[in-house]
Image (cartoon, grey):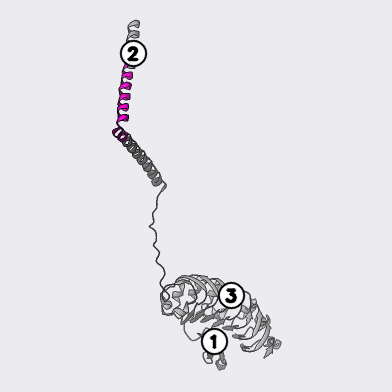
């Protein structure tokens, strides 16, 4: 099939599955899909030549549990409203279904690529919740609102131009079985919350710009190096060990301690200066005989002069005292 998505489909209000994948359809994804096909549970448009942005009103498809727009030429950012798909938000207490689906629906057959292979979902389609936007030209950050889809089992955003950090709360998506964020430009560390995803069977974070130590608890300890290859800043098992950094001791010096230290240094420098100067002076006297003799002659003369001055002053005081009496 070629051309654009057929317009007559806009009147199929009770349509449950729209699978136009692996064709030669071009043009934009029409907004009437989100406006008119409110009964859709499966929207599969993969492997066409569709372009433009993902329509914002696609989240009006509250029953949608499988969205596959992969391998097209879609651009723009991921709508934050993707986190509002009602059928993918809640985790059920049992494993039967995120939604109750009529018996006839089990007769549908959907091909979906996940976990690195193509699977034919025929009788277990009611268990599937999936978003696949891989192999497009999407850019910007992964919206944190996406982590509200707690009932999502498969998420593939690989081979795009996504930037920024992996949302910290992505680990809240505890029933994720497959997560592929490879071949993007994501930065920062792998969130430690990933350790809480106990159902995760396939993880691919390769060929990004991630850094830091790889968390080792939970399911993360079961993946091999191919999961993380192409991230030069990542380290730790199963990649080479992280470099060991010696953390400097935590020295806390108060303002008062600083003042005491300054005073101690000042007094020490005075004492050291006096001692050094004194011994330099004494050493000079000892080593230089002429200087030593001159110094003691000067002391003798100074002593005589002081004695004479004292005697004269004393005589004047006695004379003045006798006159007054």
User: 156 or 187, which lies in front?
Assistant: 187
Q: Name the residue under label 3.
A: 161
- Give how far apart the Cα atoms at labels 3 and 2 are: 104 Å
On the image, the x and y values in percent for residue 302 come to 33, 22
On the image, the x and y values in percent for residue 306 come to 33, 19
* Dot 1 or dot 3, earlier in sequence: 1
* Dot 3 or dot 2, earlier in sequence: 3
**In the rendered image, is residue 222 in sight?**
yes
Numbered mark located on residue 113 in the image: 1
Numbered mark located on residue 312 in the image: 2
Depth-wise, is mark 1 or mark 3 nearer the camera? Answer: 3
Numbered mark located on residue 244 in the image: none
On the image, the x and y values in percent for residue 295 come to 32, 27
**What stretch of residues is rendered in magenta?**
281-308
Q: Which residue is drawn at 40% across and 45% down?
A: 256
Magenta stretch holds residue 289: yes
Q: Name the main secondary structure of what is drawn in magenta.
A: helix
Compared with residue 14, is residue 81 higher up or lower down, i.e. above or below?
above
**In the rendered image, is residue 100 in sight?**
no
């Amino acid at each position: 099939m070629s051309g654009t998505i057929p317009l007559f489909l806009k009147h199929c209000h009770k349509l449950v599955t729209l699978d136009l994948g692996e064709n030669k359809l071009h043009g934009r994804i029409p907004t009437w899909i989100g406006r008119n096909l409110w009964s859709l549970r499966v929207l599969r448009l993969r492997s066409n030549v569709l372009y433009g942005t993902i329509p914002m009103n696609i989240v009006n498809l509250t029953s949608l549990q499988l969205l596959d727009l992969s391998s097209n030429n879609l651009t723009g950012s991921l709508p934050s409203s993707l986190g509002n798909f009602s059928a993918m938000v809640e985790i059920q207490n049992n494993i039967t279904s995120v939604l109750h689906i009529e018996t006839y629906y089990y007769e549908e057959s959907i091909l979906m690529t996940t976990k690195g292979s193509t699977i034919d979902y025929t009788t277990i389609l009611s268990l599937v919740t999936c978003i696949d936007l891989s192999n497009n030209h999407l850019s910007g950050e992964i919206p944190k609102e996406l982590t509200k889809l707690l009932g999502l089992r498969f998420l593939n955003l690989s081979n795009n131009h996504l930037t920024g950090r992996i949302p910290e709360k992505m680990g809240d998506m505890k029933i994720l079985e497959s997560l592929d964020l490879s071949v993007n430009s994501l930065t920062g560390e792998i969130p430690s919350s990933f350790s809480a995803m106990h159902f995760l069977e396939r993880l691919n974070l390769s060929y990004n710009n991630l850094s830091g130590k790889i968390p080792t608890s939970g399911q993360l300890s079961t993946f091999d190096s191919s999961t993380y290859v192409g991230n030069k800043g990542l380290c730790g098992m199963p990649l080479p060990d992280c470099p060991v950094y010696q953390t400097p001791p935590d020295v806390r010096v108060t303002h008062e301690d600083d003042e005491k230290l300054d005073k101690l240094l000042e007094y020490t420098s005075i004492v050291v200066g006096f001692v050094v100067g004194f011994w330099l002076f004494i050493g000079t006297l000892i080593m230089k005989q002429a200087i030593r003799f001159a110094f003691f002659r000067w002391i003798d003369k100074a002593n005589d002069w002081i004695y004479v001055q004292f005697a004269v002053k004393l005589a004047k005081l006695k004379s003045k005292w006798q006159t007054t009496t």
